[in-house]
Image (cartoon, rainbow, N blue to C red):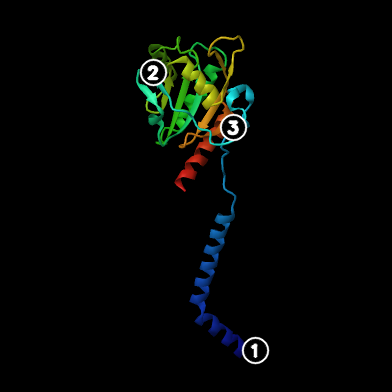
Amino acid sequence: MSRNFALMLKFFAKYKFLGLVLLFLSVVIIILMYNALKPKNRLPIYQPSMVNTDLVDSSLHRQKQQHTIANFKLINQNGDSITQEDYQDKIYVADFFFTTCLTICPIMTKNMAGLQKDILEMEDVMLLSHSVTPKIDSVPRLKEYAVEKGVIDAKWNLVTGDKEQIYDLARKSYLAVKTDGDGGTFDMIHTENFILIDKEKRIRGYYDGTNEQEVKKLLKDIRILKESYEQ
């Protein structure tokens, strides 16, 4: 018995290094297989047919693919022209508001300002807020509002411009506002929606901008989207 035991010890001593190498390789293979098979967090790509029809222009109700945000040219709080080029290769969060709103807008703006802090170090993430009352929200008014709310110009544009263009963006691109129902031309009722847009100008999520938990989910989804580009 002792002789057999001694032979066994001699055998294991001889092949100890090989055994450790095989054990290490086995662990590495198991980890790689786990990561490969682990479900990836993926965000949906929203199409008009997936969104409440009240928020979508009737011409798009049946569109099921290839929806992207249209090109635009608007004016921000500093009087600068803002176009898609300013958001090229950027993830961004868009919403609709007006500076004289006393209901949901103050809450939305507060939560957007909080989000601004969270993304401050994310160079490829920005914010974009569109006024639904562009005649009232002139550049000086937007600048006053931006200063009051702590807007950082490099991260967050508040934009005004042609009302028809903003209406079309809201109803045909972001799919995020209702018509006011009184027959007025290009009049709209904005919602509480924050809209997450990816670097290909596609809608990746809608979030209640008045709800802190929803805004936390938005921040989580921004990180998921960033990781998808880093991979």
- Mark 1 crowd level (few <14, some 14–19, many ≥20, 10 Å Cα): few
The amino acid type of the residue labelled 3 equals Gln
Point 46% across, 13% down: residue: 134
Mark 3 and 2 residues: CB-CB less than 8 Å, in contact? no
Numbered disc in front, either 3 or 2: 3
Mark 2, residue position: 77
Depth check: give the residue in front, 48 or 199: 48
Give the quarter of the figure containing the N terminus: bottom right
Q: Which mark is residue 1?
A: 1
Locate residue 144: give its quadrant: top left
Mark 3, residue position: 63
Measured in 3D between alpha carbons, the distance from the residue under mark 1 to the one under mark 3, in whole angstroms, is 80 Å
The amino acid type of the residue labelled 1 equals Met
Q: Residue furthest bottom?
A: 3
The numbered mark, 2 or 1, whose residue comes first in the sequence reads 1
Depth check: give the residue in front, 72 or 147: 72
The numbered mark, 3 or 2, whose residue comes first in the sequence reads 3
Locate residue 136: give its quadrant: top left
Depth check: give the residue in front, 171 or 3: 171
- Which secondary structure lies at badge 3? loop
Picture coordinates of residue 209, whole percent (x, y): 56, 25
Numbered disc in front, either 1 or 3: 3
